Amino acid sequence: MKSIPAIILLSSFLLLAIADSFATITKVNPGPNSIHNAIKAAKDGDTLLLLKGFYREHDIVIQKRLIILGSDFPVIDAESKYQAFIIMRDSVTLQGLQIQNIGKASITDMAGIRIVNATHVIIRNNRLINNTYGIYFQHAGQCDILNNTIHSNAKGEINGGNGIHAWKSDHLTIKGNSISGHRDGIYFEFVTDSRITGNISYSNARYGLHFMFSHNDTYTQNTFKDNGAGVAVMYSKGVIMHENEFLLNWGDASYGLLLKEITDSKIEHNRFIKNTIGIHMEGTTRVDVQHNLFQNNGWALRVQASCSGSNFLENNFTGNSFDVSTNGTMMLNTFNNNYWDKYDGYDLDKNNIGDVPYYPVSVYSVITEKIPSAMVLYHSFLTDIIDQVEKVMPTMIPDKLKDNYPLMKKLNL
Amino acid sequence: MKIIIKYVLLDLLRNKTILVYTFILAVLSVSLLSMDDNTSKGLLSLLNITLLFVPIISILFSTIYFFNSVEFIELLLAQPIRRKTMLLAEYAGIAFALSIAYLLGVGVPIFVMSYSTAAVTLIISGLFLTLIFTGLALLIFVLFKDKTKGIGAAIITSLFFAILFDGLLLSFIYSFSDYPIDKPLLGLISLNPIDLARILVLLQLDVAVMMGYSGALFKKFMGSATGSIYSVVCMLLWVAVPLMISMKVFKKKDL
């Protein structure tokens, strides 16, 4: 019976602990400074439930471990002058809010939700409308951004901000968001080990997705559509791009995918449809381009002579005006087992592999690469003739750029 | 004049070539437009056909027709008719017939299957090309006395505008690529009705962005009111100048 006091002591401790962890749920009604006051009164682990209504509040700094839920999308309006939420503590959750009309300033990048030096933040099912920057990470880690709608109407590249902007962060998960009308849909700078999955980024003024110095990131099953300049991935290594769709990035200076100084990356099972340039590669090393579909693009691939060690394997090229263009005679990349709809060789042994190599660079594309103004002869009868002549007697096209095993039948991708 | 046009038209109807031409154009247009669900692509193929076939057929057929009706012309000129009226009537008859053939063969399928601004531009350019190359045929007819020489000249003329001119243009672009040649290019293009027609139609299609800087410059110019007037005036000049020269030559020609 000596242990009874010990048991009582222990259970009272436990009870205290449970009582402490019983976080309270506070309902917040619209009113002057109601969110500010609610946050001031709350403790770590509390939940604030914002009821439906219109909250004219701004610069809401969260330095406690809070869960902020919105019921029926309460509107937080920053009156086109200020920022809305600034999260500076770990494990904060924002869910079901509508955050709108963030201000514009030259000194600070004003954002709907700014996450500063925090980890494990979850931003889920919010609507961010008409903001300069939507969600802004700075020094964040292990955060999840799920199923948000981020829409703005940026006029031009200079004044607009980015939908999701991440700087010096790691292990972010960006999933199922819909982003439109910003400068860049998603912007990554010094962001590592992150996943971008199932987002749709469309009608942005500049890039649908913009990577700078961001290593070991994966993006899969995203759709990038109708953006001013497509998608740009620059100065990064270990980038994995899977099953994305690059559609309708059509314009004078648009790319489906622009790769610059990329090393050891994989581009697989993507679809490039109706872009001015499907993939533009510059200074890339060891990039595997496999099982992709290039359809109805102006140029399917533009591989500069500065690229090396890349493999183009088992892709489908159909209906492109130019399959491949390059700016030199040097070619340190390999093309094998692709299907080219312009291939007119034969297959005597019926093994589904053409018996003569295919040269995907047409002489007209060599000429226009050297002298862009020669493009005024596009679709003229002369260019067809010189292409045919060059096919019989190749003199100008880079003879090292060829597919030795062109497929006779389209691959099922 | 009306009576002569009527007889030329009747004669052309009896001659089955125009009917065959219409039929071939119609078959090509319908099959090209229905083959691809992408109408822009169908239009592009039709553009290629218009640019290649319309000039060659127009000029060759008209030249041969003019030379074949030399006796008819001489007979008419024995009547109290002015040479100018007679020649214009001959031209009007054949140009009208060929234009109707083009309208029926290409215009109707396009209007039914894929109507757009680009399509209208294509039809107008095709009609202009018909008028221009029939006019050039007339010029060839009055300049040459011998039928064989005339047909040779017609072939050379059509090949010149279809291929050779572009070759010269390409070598011009090559040799002056270090200079800002986009504006001179715009002027040079107007010297060839086929190129003019091609660029007018291409600018209406979405492939225009592939033409890069020069394309953007062209679009800016051709898209403006001045540009449209300029290109129409160029085309009209291409119709009028050969006609006027042939009239002048024919007036003094020793038949």
Image: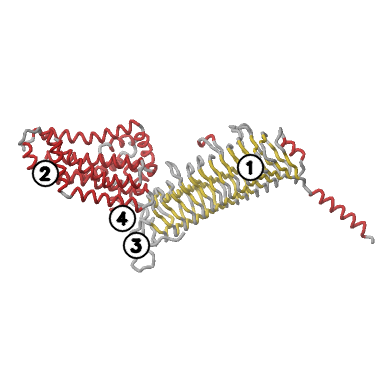
Q: CA distance from mark 2 to mark 1?
A: 83 Å
Dot 4 falls on a residue whose secondary structure is helix
Name which residue lies at 21% across and 51% down. B20
Q: Residue under circle 4?
A: A391
Front tag of 2 and 4: 2
**Chain letter behind tag 3:** A
- Identify the residue at the far bottom of this view: A349
Measuring from the top left, give residue A368's x and y in whole percent.
35, 45
**Chain letter behind tag 2:** B
Name the amino acid, label 2.
Answer: Phe
Q: CA distance from mark 4 to mark 1?
A: 54 Å
At label 1, counting other C-alpha atoms closer than 10 Å, the crowd grade (few under 14, some 14-19, many 20 or more) is some
Front tag of 3 and 2: 2
Name the amino acid, label 4.
Answer: Lys
**Chain letter behind tag 4:** A
Q: Residue under circle 2?
A: B67
Q: Earlier in the sequence, mark 4 or mark 1?
A: 1
Please identify the quarter of the rendering in which residue B93 is found: top left
Answer whether residue A126 is visible to the viewer in this image: yes
Q: Residue under circle 3?
A: A356
Q: Residue under circle 1?
A: A138
Measuring from the top left, give residue A333's x and y in whole percent.
44, 55
